[in-house]
Image (cartoon, rainbow, N blue to C red):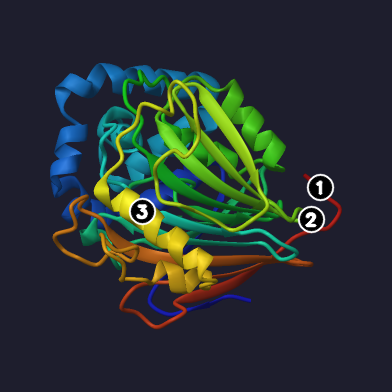
Amino acid sequence: MTTTSGLRYHEVAGTAATRGFALGVAGRATVAQIVSQSPLWHRITAPDLTPAVRRMADATRALFPEFHSEIAALADGLELPFDPVFAWNARGDLLAGLGDGCTTVQVPGDEPVIAHNEDGLPGLLGHCFIAELRPDSAPTATSFCYPGSIPGHTFAVTAAGLVIAVNNLRLLGIVPEIPRMVLARALLGAPDRDAMVQLLRDAPPSGGFHLSIAQMDASDIWSVSFGGGEVHVVENTRPMLHSNHAQCAGPVMSRQSITDSSRDRLFRGLELLEQGAAPLSILSDTGGAGLPIFRADPDDPDDENTVAQFHARLISTGIDWQIDIPGQASPTRTGFMPVTRGMDES
């Protein structure tokens, strides 16, 4: 059962080409009017980045042909050439200092909870949508989508019993061979967390992401940080918070840019966790001495505002989830992802 108010919903089924084209049509107006007019789009599609874009496109075609086809069809649906659309879907690999920044709360336990603030370009508030992905040969997944982008790099629930929330890592000095968004897209089809981690370990170097992953029949929540060929896994058994900078050691992970907002959100969030605050209360917080967790300032120093809030709880029969959009009826969308029991415990 799913309810909605003010958040577009698209069922995206079939082949990669069919899915990609549908995603392109869904985002066409917003990309034409907002995304492609942004300074970030013009920087990402600049000629000096073309060799890196083509290198990553070739690697995607070789290693993940399904998602290369999905991006090509996405471009068709957007009525744009392939190269700039692929570049947009590799933006975090091309520009390490990208402003993207989100906050995720992890609460392990008998009914684990992942809650997440999706922070994006302020102009995209109200223009994002939900995609119900029904591929021909992978589990159904429900994912929050930005116009012009493939699914997987925000937050999602899957019929394999997985909840995934993704945060940007600003890793420095990386020569990316494949887009991190392509890897995140591929993870939506994984049967379990072990398979997700193995996919990342087998992949060429990419830009950095942090994943919060909860799985049915497991009480812990995994923190997975990857980028530049490194993959770090921490199996959290107590409440934790992530605010888009790496919190693990490693030659690559130690070379990162940490913004004031990222640092302030971590300190404030950990303080609220210590006080026993509920996940959505933490994500809605505007207090503290520094920059706030909930981001609504048009002059945000990272050019980021909270465009959605997500809360998912894994219960005995599936995943109970809701999404709130700032300024719209709350909850904007609620849903339940049924999951077949019997998966291996992690």
Which quadrant does the N terminus fall into? Answer: bottom right
Question: Is 184 placed left or right of 341 in the picture?
Answer: left
Residue carrying label 3:
146
Tag 1, which secondary structure?
loop
Mark number, residue 300 = none
At x 79%, y 55%, the residue is: 217
Q: Nearer the viewer, mark 1 or mark 3?
A: 1
Identity of the amino acid at label 3?
Answer: Tyr
Q: Residues within 10 Å of mark 1 (few under 14, many from 20)?
A: few
Identity of the amino acid at label 1?
Answer: Glu
Residue carrying label 1:
345
At x 39%, y 23%, the residue is: 57
Which residue is nearer to you in this view: 336 or 200? 200
The disc, 1 or 3, on the residue closer to the chain's N-terminal end is: 3
Q: CA distance from mark 2 to mark 3?
A: 31 Å
Residue 69 appears in the rendering: no
Identity of the amino acid at label 2?
Answer: Asp
Q: Nearer the viewer, mark 2 or mark 3?
A: 2
Which residue is nearer to you in this view: 224 or 276? 276
Residue 172 appears in the rendering: yes
Q: CA distance from mark 1 to mark 3?
A: 33 Å
Q: Residue 170 placed where, x, y %?
A: 34, 35
Residue extending farthest to the bottom is: 329
